[in-house]
Amino acid sequence: MALLHIHTPSHSITTLSPILSFHSPPPLHFSLPHSTLKTHQQNSLFSTATTTKNTPFLLSTLPKKLLCQPPRGTYVREDYLVKKLSAQEVQELVKGERTVPIIIDFYATWCGPCILMAQELEMLAVEYEQNALIVKVDTDDEYEFARDMQVRGLPTVFFISPDPSKDAIRTEGLIPIQMMRDIIDNEM
């Protein structure tokens, strides 16, 4: 392996060459004037010291702009509209009398796509606040129930119609919000 050895008046730097060869050439020796050497300086963008001139560009000083409008519903609260239920509570909901479809989201707290799906389900809960009931079940807490429901991928969403003659619709993985709207509007 070839070695690169640089001599400067006050520094000596040795680095390994990225080229591997069986017959390495003799080491290179050359000198650079001290003024051309770059020294490591702290990046002013991330420095904690403040100066009066040449202040760094900070993202926090920019005006904040919304990327999209928040969902418009009859009410939007700070706490989540989609409530976490136990297996027993979900079974009672499904067996009980109702006039709206139930959407059951099987998720896990460590699942990235589940977090994205939860955001979409929150928007749906605002949109369909009187026309659908959306709940979620943590598969880590309700492992046996998730196994009985044959949940093999996360997130898994069940759409259960209030009409007992219609079959439940099941989706696995992250699906677009428009697909969920279409299922609620057309299939339930």
Image (cartoon, rainbow, N blue to C red):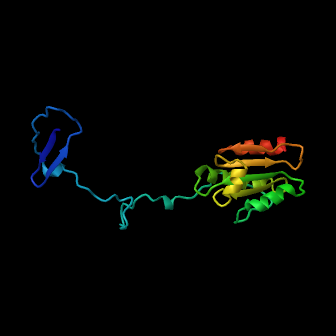
Q: Is residue 70 visible?
A: no
Quadrant (top left, top right, bottom left, bottom right) of the N terminus: top left
Residue 125 appears left or right of 3: right
| Position of residue 88 measured from the top left corner of the image (x, y, whole percent) | 77, 61
Could you tell me which residue is drawn at 9 percent across and 52 percent down? Answer: 9
Could you tell me which residue is drawn at 72 percent across and 57 percent down? Answer: 136
Residue 112 appears left or right of 95: left
The answer to which of 10 and 157 lies nearer the viewer is 157
Q: Can residue 41 be seen in this view?
A: yes
| Position of residue 125 measured from the top left corner of the image (x, y, whole percent) | 76, 55
The answer to which of 161 and 167 lies nearer the viewer is 167
Which quarter of the figure has residue 73? bottom right
Q: How many marks?
A: 0
The answer to which of 15 and 24 lies nearer the viewer is 24
Relative to 69, residue 176 above or below: above
| Position of residue 93 measured from the top left corner of the image (x, y, whole percent) | 83, 58
Could you tell me which residue is drawn at 12 percent across and 48 percent down? Answer: 33
| Position of residue 142 measured from the top left corner of the image (x, y, whole percent) | 68, 59
Quadrant (top left, top right, bottom left, bottom right) of the C terminus: top right
Relative to 178, residue 115 above or below: below
